[in-house]
Amino acid sequence: DIQVTQSPSSLSASVGDTVTISCRTSQTINNYLNWYQQKPGKAPELLVFPASSLQSGVPSRFSGSGSGTDFSLTISSLQPEDFATYYCQQSYSAPTTFGQGTRLEIK
Amino acid sequence: QLQLQESGPGLVKPSDTPSLTCTVSGASISGSSYYWAWIRQSPGKGLEWIGSVFFSGSTYYNPSLKSRVTISVDTSRNEFSLKLRSVTAADTAVYYCARQLGTVVANFDYWGQGTLVTVSS
C-alpha cells in the first residue's frame, strides 16, 4: 500500500493568516492526490482533486499544488470556519489510502 | 440533492457479524456510473477505505479486510450494505458510506453522516 504522511499533525494559526499543510506519499502518484476538510462530528468533505482543482463551492482561498510524491494545501486569509482537520488521500493505486490528518486550531 | 444515510446496530459483541446499510436518496444507484463505498474512521487507524460496489454488484475490497467483508447492493431499495464478520474491538469506528468518483481508486464527493459501531462485550 502507498503510505501517505501529512505534516504537521497540528497547527495553530489566527484568522487572516495563510497556512500550508504538506502531504508526502511513499511512491510517485502523479497528481492523484485529494484533500478533505472534516469538522467535529461531521463527515469529511472533498475540497481539492486531483491535486489542484477545487471542488464546486469551495472558496478560492483554498489551493492545492504538487505532483509526484510531494503535495501541499494552502489556505489563504484563514476564516473562522476553516478551523478543522484536513486529510489528504491518494487515489493512484489500490487500496486508496489517507494521511493521518492535520488539525488546524485557532491561536 | 444527493444524500446518503447510514444505519447500523450501534453496539455489537466481539465475534458478531454486524450489517450496516446506506440508503441513497436524490439519485438512483442503478442510473449512474458511480461506485459506492464504505469507509471507516477510528482514533487508532484514521480513515480507512473498506470497499466499494457498483450497481451491477461488482465489488472490490481493501485487501486488509477482504476476508471479513461483504458489500452488496439492492437497487430496488436504492441502498447498499456492508457485512463485517468476526468483529473485534479494533473494528470499533465510525462507518461512513460515500459516493466514489471513479472506478478502482478515486475520491469521494458525497458522504453520509456516519454511524458509530462499538464492539464491546
Image: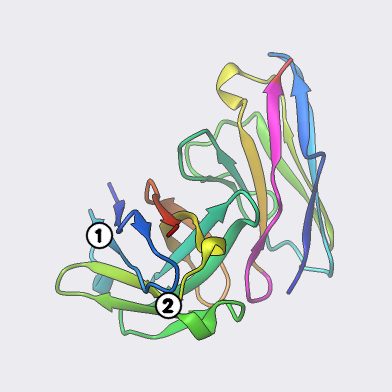
Alpha carbon distance from label 1 to label 2: 21 Å
Q: Which residue is mark 1?
A: B23
Regarding residue B32, the answer to whether it shows in the image is no
A26 w.r.t. A82: above or below? below
Determine if the magenta segment contains residue A103. Answer: yes
B96 w.r.t. B68: above or below? above
Q: Residue furthest left?
A: B76
Which colour assignment does the render follow?
rainbow
Badge 1: chain ID: B
Regarding residue A107, the answer to whether it shows in the image is yes
Which residue is drawn at the image coordinates 66% and 64% (left, top)?
Answer: A97
Front position in the image: B60 or B19 = B19
Determine if the magenta segment contains residue B10. Answer: no
Say what secondary structure mark 2 lies in: loop
The numbered dot on residue B85 is: 2
Q: Residues within 10 Å of mark 1 (few under 14, many from 20)?
A: some
Say what secondary structure mark 1 lies in: strand
Amino acid at the residue labelled 1 = Thr
What range is drawn magenta here? A92-105
- Location of the C terminus of chain A by quadrant is top right
Q: Residue furthest front?
A: B121
Relative to A10, B11 lies left or right? left
Relative to B83, A26 lies left or right? right
- Location of the N terminus of chain A by quadrant is bottom right
Dot placed on the residue nearer the N-terminal end, 1 or 2: 1
Amino acid at the residue labelled 2 = Arg
Which residue is drawn at the image coordinates 71% and 50% (left, top)?
Answer: A100
Which residue is drawn at the image coordinates 65% and 28% (left, top)?
Answer: A61
